[in-house]
Image (spheres, rainbow, N blue to C red):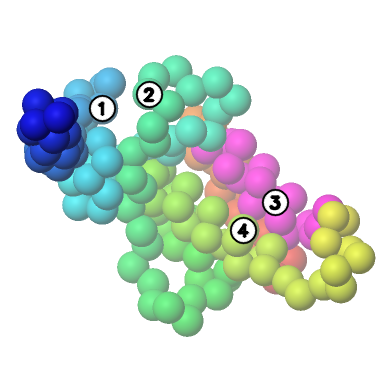
Amino acid sequence: MRLIILTTVALVAAVPALAQQSPASLSNGEGPVGTGGAGVPLSKKPANLAPLPSGSVIAPRLPSPSLGENATAKDYLKAARTAISQGELGMAQEALERAETWVLDRSVRPSQVRNQITDPVVEEISDALRALAANNAAEAQRRIDAALGKL
């Protein structure tokens, strides 16, 4: 009985030590995984937009556009446009995703929750994201301009 208790105590003491091991690196060697926030490197390239990711299934953290908490979809689209012109495609992706989320935010009746949103602005933003995935910055810019024109 004493042996069982000592073994249990030893195992319970070892579990926290295992949980505190240093995090593993990303498969592309870009730094620790699971540290959240500052431990994961920022990516200047768009991530996980293609149907089949070619590298790690863990997307790198994308840089956030420097906009306040009261930013609108239009602000995010303008930030995406600027980021593309500066070659910051990761930031452009983040800004486009935030603009899309802003446009998709809606209030509906419970019976209409399953109805897909058919908004031309959402379509343009989705097309801009697909253009980024295809490394077509000019097409992404055109789609962003079209979305801005529809807001």
Magenta span contains residue 117: yes
Q: State the separation of the CA atoms marked 3 and 1.
A: 33 Å
Graded by Cα atoms within 10 Å as few (under 14), some (14 to 19) or many (20 or more), the crowding at tag 4 reads: many
Q: Is residue 102 left or right of residue 47?
A: right
- Looking at the image, is 118 positioned above or below residue 107? above
* CB contact under 8 Å: marks 4 and 2: no
Q: Say which residue label 2 marks.
A: 56
Given residues 3 and 84, the one toward you in this image is: 3
Where, quadrant-wise, is the N terminus in this rendering?
top left
Please tell me whether mark 3 sits on a helix, a strand or a loop.
helix
The amino acid type, in three-letter code, at marker 3 is Glu
**Viewer-side residue, 75 vs 103:** 103
* Residue under numbered circle 4: 100
Amino acid type, residue under disc 1 in the picture: Leu
Q: Which mark is residue 124?
A: 3
Q: CA distance from mark 2 to mark 3?
A: 28 Å
Give coordinates of residue 55: x percent, y percent. 39, 19
- Mark nearer the N terminus (2 vs 1): 1
At label 4, the amino acid type is Glu
Closer to the chain start, of discs 4 and 2, is 2
What's the magenta region? Answer: 116-132
Q: Find residue 114 and report its horizontal and vertical position in percent.
A: 85, 55
Q: Is residue 69 visible?
A: yes
Give how far across and how far down residue 89 sits, in percent: 40, 43
Q: Amino acid at mark 2?
A: Ser
In the drawing, does residue 83 fall left or right of residue 29?
Answer: right
Residue depicted at x 83% and y 61%: 113
Mark 3 surroundings within 10 Å by alpha-carbon count, few (fewer than 14), some (14 through 19), many (20 or more): many
Q: Residue at x 62, y 58 (%)?
A: 100
Q: Which residue is mark 1?
A: 26
- The mark that comes first in sequence, 1 or 4, is 1
- Circles 2 and 3, Cβ within 8 Å, touching? The answer is no
